[in-house]
Image (cartoon, rainbow, N blue to C red):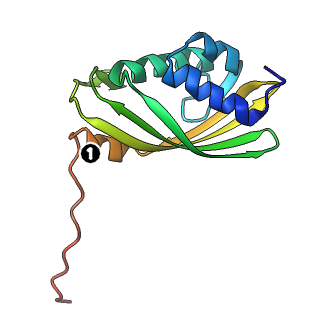
Amino acid sequence: MPSQSNETLVCAFMERIFDQGDLSAVDEFNAADGIDYQEPPGTDFIAHLKQVVVGMRTAFPDIHFEIHELLVQGDMVERNATMTGTHTGTFSLMPGHSLPPTGRKVSVPHMHFMRILDGKTTDLWHLWNVPMMMQQLGTAATPQPAHHSGNA
């Protein structure tokens, strides 16, 4: 897909991979030697991304990413999006830790930074508000406002 602009590529990436669950698109849009900087060095980029997609779509079968803005600077793309979905499947948080379905809906901000070379993602940095999601799923305490007694 080298003829596509990086902006178009990133939109297609999210639509096909996450929203539709098309695992063949993981191979199509990502370099085999790519790096996900949120994972330990040496993590197989393609295999890990497929695992993430399957896990997220298992937990949230109606998962959808709404992209709010894309910023493109050379080979770098920043994507600000909101992930929505309904927790109707088991959510594997990490090996040995899973959350049974709650039936609750989530709306979680995500930010991704991607380097794209020759039509493939080679580097990925991502942030998402996990504490907010856990609160929405009812598994984390809601922060309480600090109370000040007025005494010093």
Q: Quadrant of the N terminus?
A: top right
In terms of depth relative to the viewer, which is nearer, 96 or 71? 71
In the rendered image of this protein, does residue 35 appear above or below residue 144? above
- Res. 41 in view: no
Q: Residue 147's x, y, as percent? A: 18, 75
In terms of depth relative to the viewer, which is nearer, 5 or 38? 5
Tally the numbered discs: 1
In terms of depth relative to the viewer, which is nearer, 120 or 12? 12
- Res. 73 in view: yes
In the rendered image of this protein, does residue 144 appear above or below residue 88? below
Going 48% across and 20% down the picture, which residue do you hit? 53
Going 69% across and 24% down the picture, which residue do you hit? 34
Q: Residues within 10 Å of mark 1 (few under 14, many from 20)?
A: some
Give the image quarter of residue 25. top right
Judged left or right of residue 11, residue 107 is left
Amino acid under disc 1: Gln
Give the image quarter of residue 26. top right
Give the image quarter of residue 90. top left
Going 53% across and 19% down the picture, which residue do you hit? 48
Q: Quadrant of the C terminus?
A: bottom left
Helix, strand or loop at label 1? It is: helix
Q: Which residue is mark 1?
A: 135
Q: Residue 145's x, y, as percent? A: 23, 68
Going 55% across and 29% down the picture, which residue do you hit? 40
Q: Residue 60's x, y, as percent? A: 35, 25
